[in-house]
Image (spheres, coloured by chain):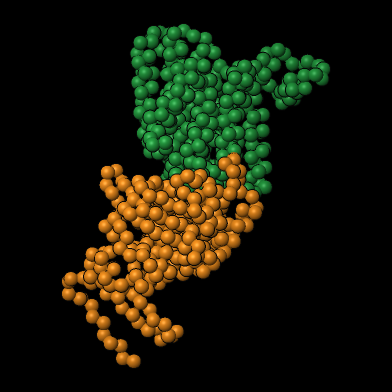
Chain colours: A orange, B green
Amino acid sequence: MEKVIEILNASFVYGKQLVWHDINLDIFKGELLCLLGANGCGKTTLLNCIHGDQTLENGSILLNGKQIEKMQTIQIAKQIGVVFQEHTTPFPYSVLDVVLMGRGPHLGMFKSPSDKDRGIALKSLKSMGVLALKDKRYTEISGGERQLVLIARTLTQEPEVILLDEPTSFLDFKNQALVLEMIRKLARKGLTIIMTSHFPNHALICADRVALMSNGTMVAIGETHKIMTEINLEKTYDIGVKILSVNDKENGKTIKFCMPCIKEEHICELLEQPE
Amino acid sequence: MTRQKLIILIAMPLLIFFISLFVGRLFIDPVTLLKVLCSKIFFFIPMEKTWTDAVEIVVIRIRLPRALMAMMVGAGLSISGAAFQGMFNNPLVSPYLLGVSSGAGFGAALAILIDSGTIIIQTASFFFGTLAVVITYCISRVYKTTPLLMLVLSGVVVSSFFMALISLIKFIADPEEKLPTIVFWIMGSFGGVRLEDILITCPPIVIGIIGLLFVRWRINLMSMGDREAKAMGTKVELLKVIIIICTTMISAAAVSVCGIIGWVGLVIPHICRLWVGPDHKVLLPVTIVVGACYLLIIDNFARAMTSSEIPLGILTAIIGAPFFAYLLRRSKGGWF
């Protein structure tokens, strides 16, 4: 398989504190990799290093064989699109104007988008299923819609790789599923995707491979079903974890999911439903 | 942009410009006015002179330069304000944020103190206005970047420093003669504007405006924050420098000739955003026109409302502040 991104012996220092070290990770073309790890373990920092926003202390990151630190902002933006977690703008742009911003890497500093760029933006909105929102104010749409619009914006960049920093945070149950479904759809179309998440279940739902981070290093990296074990997750999060599987009777597939164990007595007990 | 808005944008400045040539104590009928203007524009065509010299002087040497200057300064300050508000992704920012006005005010006060002529006052004012911004930029530069918050805070520091220097000069200035001159100068006025001033002020303001128009779409990306703009392929630091140079040229030129005219650069972008939306690609050209009209109207009031002239800076604040309060209430804190 073709490697798109190679992370070699990478370490990162914040101030004087070593955040993570000796990280080796290859990301292959067309896969969806999910980064899991506790709060503050440096998942976001790793993403930022991949798109050249922050720089490594040691080691290197290669994008299609080229060192990311030696690449120009515009060159990186043509190949990597990013959906950030925190995001505020005081100006109520229309959704289409926001998505058009994704044409940034393809237009000169003194240029404005043309009709062709507008066409690409509309196509991205359509592929995310939010074309109807194009004239709405970006500040007035729901959190789930906003996330889809931001993904559409990175698609407008026409990148090879998309980085998503906790794309499901701040979303309700249904919108989490909707966003994950759309991300899965992008991977099927051949885009390489790296996302971070706080929910191991989201990796189980959609990731091809998983990387587990804890205590400044990688606990395990590999295919989702091999890596997502109780032992690995316990190491990652430092709590008891149970992995359960259920047979989905509608399509005969096995669904896996995980639950944290809490020490307090169970308050709610599920009753067996009579068939 | 609808056709209707486009027509308003073209007709409005022409109409207001023409009307303001009538405003004043000396009444001039429209036909004579047109004749005087035409005789100057088409000077190569011989025309019979049916008007008095007084009329010609009032129109060509007093009202015309004043109107042109008001429009140019209004346009420049408004587009600078809009560009800064986008760049700092904050709608409460004015073009004087980085200390250009206090620097320029200090330059002028210093030149008045040492008894200089108009040209020296304008040059000193332009120089110190630019210097203040350069100092602000240098203070805020850390690790090859200039974080927006650092720029804002350094701007506050540099502004207060030059404000203190202005106070110092006022304190030592001769209270009979020079102190009033300094005070009136800082309040802002188009009172003494001559045709020659237009020629001096025009290049920096026009170049600054053109520069901002070139990067106007990129300001949309900037308003998403530095990190996102960069991730979308923007050379953020270069863009900041371009915007700062353009706005500084404009506001230093404006202040050096007309004094500190506040509120225009803050209020006009808001009005325009309300009217045509926040997309800077459309917003920036619109602020030019609306800003030019606004300041011209205010200046007409300043010179014609009472028998003696009211300093412009006072009027823009008296009209601007309550209007801004009204906009704030209307938006209920959400930014339009």
Q: Is residue A273 above or below residue B285?
A: below
Q: Nearer the viewer, residue B173 or B50?
A: B173
Measuring from the top left, give residue A40's x and y in whole percent.
29, 55
Residue pictured at 28% horizontal, 64% vertical: A236
Looking at the image, which residue is at 39% across and 8% down? B174
Quarter of the view holding residue B102: top left
At a point 45% along the width and 65% down the height, the residue shown is A32
Q: Residue furthest bottom?
A: A275
Q: Using the image as rendered, state which of residue B208 and residue B285 is in the foreground.
A: B208
Q: In the rendered view, would you say A125 is above or below B148?
A: below
Depth check: B108 or A36 in front? A36
Residue A172 seen in the current view:
no
Give the tally of numbered discs. Answer: 0
- Residue B101: which quarter of the image? top left
Residue A53 lies left or right of residue A101; in this view the side is: left
Residue at horizontal 59%, vertical 43%? A108
Residue A188: percent from left, percent from top: 51, 69
Q: At which x and y percent is residue B304?
A: 56, 23
Image location of residue B131, percent across then percent down: 45, 23
Q: Quadrant of the C terminus of chain A?
A: bottom left
Q: Is residue A125 visible?
A: yes
